[in-house]
Image (cartoon, rainbow, N blue to C red):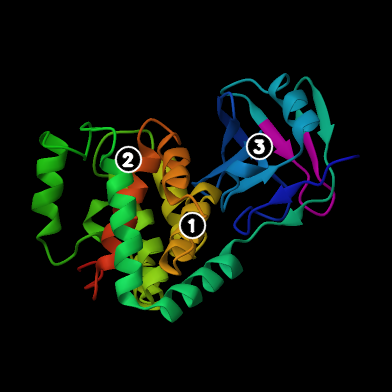
Amino acid sequence: MSFRALAGPLVPRGAWEARTAGVFRGAIALDHPDGLWVTILRSREDMEARGIWPGPEAFDALAGLVVPGRPLAFSGLGDPVFMAPGGQVRIALPEDWDPRPDLAAAASAVRAAGPEALEAAVARVRAALASDGYSEGIHGDGPFARRLSELRGRPDFPFNLAGFGPGTTPAGDDFLAGWLLGRILAGGGEEALAAAARIDTARTTIPGRTLLAGAAWGVFPAYLVRVAKAVALASQGDFENDLAEAIRAAVSHGASSGRDACLGLTEGASHETSQGPQG
């Protein structure tokens, strides 16, 4: 095969079978028996903790075979074959996709630049988010935004956001993932991720749980990793790097997921301490 497959670090390595939850333009979502999604992705640019990028030909072949609600079997990452009722698709042995080394390098660069430089970069993120006047969901002054303000004042914020807000992946989950990423950039990731391991994910949807499972391990969707790297470069005064363009690309992710996550990143990067989930 002419392409190289990729697999995220939280993809189950052995053989398994899962129900096809949905077939979308850019992904095939599978309800794995462990209670989380595994996503088969059209583009390697959309990689995530529970994602498999099988290559373009294999994705198209699978999209033509799978049926929502029907099972899809996988032979495991050691001998990767997808088996659907109508046929099977073999993929190349996947390489590991793990953004954590890149995030560690970005956090190191931010620490070297200092807190004022990070705040300047975060201010640019806020400006980019505000540039189009978007005011839906948790943005603006609608009911979800007002409720977010109330939740922000509680001692278990932002961990109380699991399952909060609109969206297949609730806006609160996206915000929380971005907040954790912001904490990593600001040097508070160890404490924040330790607290994230205790989030009550029973309150949210399966895709929300899947996102938060990756975030709790410090593994964020590729689009957010690109934002984090752009923030790190901006904090170093690299204005050849177009942070605004990285934000524009992020806010196109999902209905509002990218925008919600970027908002969370700005607050996480500016936050000094976290109390963690209560109870």
Task: Find the distance from the CA under tag 2 to the CA under tag 1.
Answer: 25 Å
Q: Relative to residue 13, is residue 272 drawn left or right?
A: left
| Residue 48 picture location, percent across and down | 56, 49
Residue closer to the observer: 238 or 189? 238
For residue 43, the mark is 3
Residue at which label 1 appears: 230
Q: Is residue 205 visible?
A: no
Is the residue marked by circle 3 packed among few (<14), some (14-19), or many (20+) residues within 10 Å?
Answer: some
Q: Hey, what amino acid is under mark 3?
A: Ser
Element under disc 2: loop
Q: Residue at x 55, y 72 (%)?
A: 105
| Residue 144 picture location, percent across and down | 16, 38
For residue 168, the mark is none
Task: Find the distance from the CA under tag 1 to the CA under tag 3.
Answer: 20 Å
Residue 251: name its quadrant: top left
Q: Hey, what amino acid is under mark 2?
A: Pro
The label nearer to you, 2 versus 3, is 3
Residue at which label 2 appears: 170
Range drawn in magenta: 72-82
Quadrant of image for the C terminus: bottom left
Task: Kindly check if marks 2 and 1 are in contact, taking CB atoms under 8 A apart as contact.
Answer: no
Is the residue marked by circle 1 packed among few (<14), some (14-19), or many (20+) residues within 10 Å?
Answer: many
Q: Relative to residue 262, is residue 161 drawn left or right?
A: left
Element under disc 3: loop
Q: Relative to residue 89, is residue 103 drawn left or right?
A: left
Task: Kindly check if marks 1 and 3 are in contact, taking CB atoms under 8 A apart as contact.
Answer: no
Name the outermost residue toward the right.
1
Q: Residue at x 38, y 30 (%)?
A: 255
| Residue 232 picture location, percent across and down | 46, 65
Q: Residue at x 77, y 46 (%)?
A: 5
